[in-house]
Amino acid sequence: MADTLLLRAVKGKPKCLNLSSKHLTQIPRLIGKLECLNILHLKNNKIQDLPVEFSALTKLIVLNIGNNELEEIPASLGQLNSLETLHLFGNKIKKLPNKILGGLRSLTFLNLNNNDLRTVTPSINKLVNLKYLSLDGNSLTSLPSELCAISPLTELHAANNQLTALPLEIGFLVNLTKLYVQKNKIRELPEGIGKLYNLKVIDVAANELRIFPTELNKLPLKELYCEENPLIDHVPIKSVQEEEVLTLKEICARFIMSELKASLRHDSKYAGNKSTSASGTDSIICNSPISNNRWSYLRIAIRHYPSVKEMLGQASKCAFCNRSFLNTWLECVTFVDAKKDLKTMNSPGRIPIRALLCSYKCFNTPGHSFYGVAFP
């Protein structure tokens, strides 16, 4: 039957061919003669492999081979460097071969739903033009950090897996607009999510979340789904803590960061006062008696200590006083109305968002909406 269909197709030189639901167990080698094909549908068959002649379809843009019996991605697909859309859902694929991924550099859409994947190879980053990736219904326990190097990615689907966390580097997916990771075992979302400034939809329903990252409320979210999570309840209990004793390392770090911040304010204040020297170059007039002072010295000196600079680069800011600190001294929570404060179109109610405070002094100051977290 397949031979007959292909013989007819060869004569007509079609650009689109639909062989879905034809009870096919294999594809005849004659397929290699259809070099003009742009779109090929092979879904809902019983195909276990593709012939080597398949690699001749170099003009193929769309391939749907979903709901078949592939146990691995056929090697011939690695030659289809014009392929943009690839459906492999509903097969028995256990891994993603590195060599094949390297040949699919034009791919923008990849659907691997409902396979037997347990890991995603770091070589996934070879799909440099990928915009849509769907991994729903597999057995994944983690996602590689290399996935976050695919900067064009706009949609990531990884629902109904066994994920316990997302990559810390997820903030590098700057074009991500939709993130679906519902029905996993995620206990905490990485702080990097707060850097996904294009994120419009996030679905984390049916996980094990207790709190959301600190900068979630800065995202332009339109939809947030978080039901069936053990989120922290808003049950205030009065508590006052004594002032803590900071380590010498923390005191020094806070002092340096405070001085650097003051230095930047100083530069900003006097940067507007410029004059032109005799040589025609601009110079900054500093009427302040503290020009060439310890602030400038500190900024120059720190360049000679890259490890210190890197350490200070990991600092956080107090949600109350806005001062920088090196370590998380007090993890608090603030509750926001998702619909009212985050402007979401749906209404998940009040959700807990993590807030970091630099000291118990800030925590004990009245007039804020930050709460300490009490565990039963």
Image (cartoon, rainbow, N blue to C red):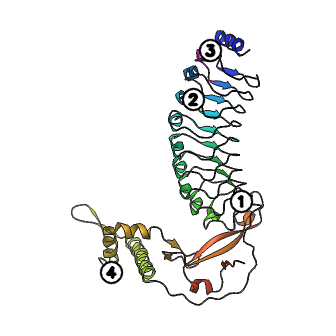
The CA span between labels 2 and 4 is 67 Å
Q: If you read the primary sequence from the N terminus, does the residue marked by circle 4 or circle 3 appear first?
A: 3
Q: Secondary structure at mark 2?
A: helix
The quadrant the C terminus occupies is bottom right
Between disc 4 and disc 1, the foreground one is: 1
Kind of residue indicated by mark 1: Asn
Which residue position is annotated with label 1? 207
Give residue 361's position: percent from left, percent from top. Answer: 57, 86
- Drawn side of residue 290 relative to residue 225, left or right: left
Res. 30 mark: 3
Q: Residue at x 68, y 46 (%)?
A: 138
State the separation of the CA atoms marked 4 and 3. Answer: 82 Å
- Residue most extreme to the left: 279
Sequence order check, earlier mark of 3 and 1 = 3
| Residue located beneath label 2 in the image | 77
Residue 279 rendering spot, x and y as whole percentages: 21, 61
Residue 290, numbered label: 4
Asked which quadrant contains residue 258, the reply is bottom left
Q: Quadrant of residue 251?
A: bottom left
Q: Camera-side residue: 295 or 232?
A: 232
Element at badge 4? loop
How far separated are the C-alphas under marks 4 and 1? 55 Å
Write down the region rendered in magenta. 28-38
Front position among marks 2 and 4: 2
| For residue 100, above or below residue 215 | above
- CA gap, disc 3 and disc 1: 48 Å
Q: Amino acid at mark 3?
A: Leu
